[in-house]
């Protein structure tokens, strides 16, 4: 099956590496899961991704389960995150969460913000 055939624009997914990394963090914090959101960027143009551990579910949260991890996203943020896959990458001594977001049209030079 190709990546195109797997793509679901109404979903939000984690790779195995991201699920493993987030699962380890969740178990250390006793959280219910992880919340992804999108905020307006303060220093750069566009938006930034936010990641928080969830101890209390909000009534307006959309709930996804990916690779055994509960993912919480508010409806407004999901409009920006629709179809996104989150990965965890280690490159040398650096580690980072990467968003593979099909909605992004441009990324800031610093790599911390994006535009839709």
Image (cartoon, rainbow, N blue to C red):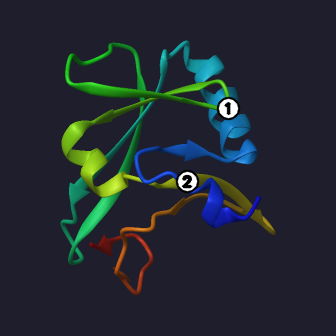
**First in sequence: mark 1 vs mark 2:** 1
Between 9 and 55, the residue placed more toward the observer is 9
Residue at the image position 73 percent from the left and 36 percent from the top: 20
Residue at the image position 55 percent from the left and 19 percent from the top: 29
Secondary element type, mark 2: strand
**In the picture, which quadrant includes the N terminus?**
bottom right
Q: Which residue is labeled 2 in the image?
A: 85
**Residue 75 percent location from the top left of the image:** 22, 38
Q: Which residue is labeled 1 in the image?
A: 67
**Residue 36 percent location from the top left of the image:** 39, 41
Relative to 44, say whether 59 is above or below: above
What whole-number distance in Å separates the C-alpha atoms at marks 1 and 2?
Answer: 12 Å
Residue at the image position 33 percent from the left and 73 percent from the top: 114
Relative to 39, say whether 106 is above or below: below
- Disc assigned to residue 109: none
**Residue 116 percent location from the top left of the image:** 27, 72
Residue at the image position 74 percent from the left and 43 percent from the top: 16
């Amino acid at each position: 099956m190709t990546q195109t055939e797997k793509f679901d624009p109404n979903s939000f997914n984690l790779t195995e590496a991201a699920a493993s990394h987030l699962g380890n963090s969740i178990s250390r914090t006793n959280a219910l899961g992880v919340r992804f959101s999108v905020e307006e960027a303060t220093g750069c143009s566009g938006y930034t991704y936010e990641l928080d551990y969830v101890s209390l579910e909000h009534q307006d949260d959309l709930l996804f389960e990916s690779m055994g991890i509960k993912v919480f996203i508010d409806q407004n943020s999901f409009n920006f995150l629709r179809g996104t896959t989150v990965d965890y990458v280690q490159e040398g001594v650096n580690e980072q969460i990467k968003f593979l977001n099909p909605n992004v049209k441009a990324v800031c030079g610093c790599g911390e913000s994006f535009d839709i």
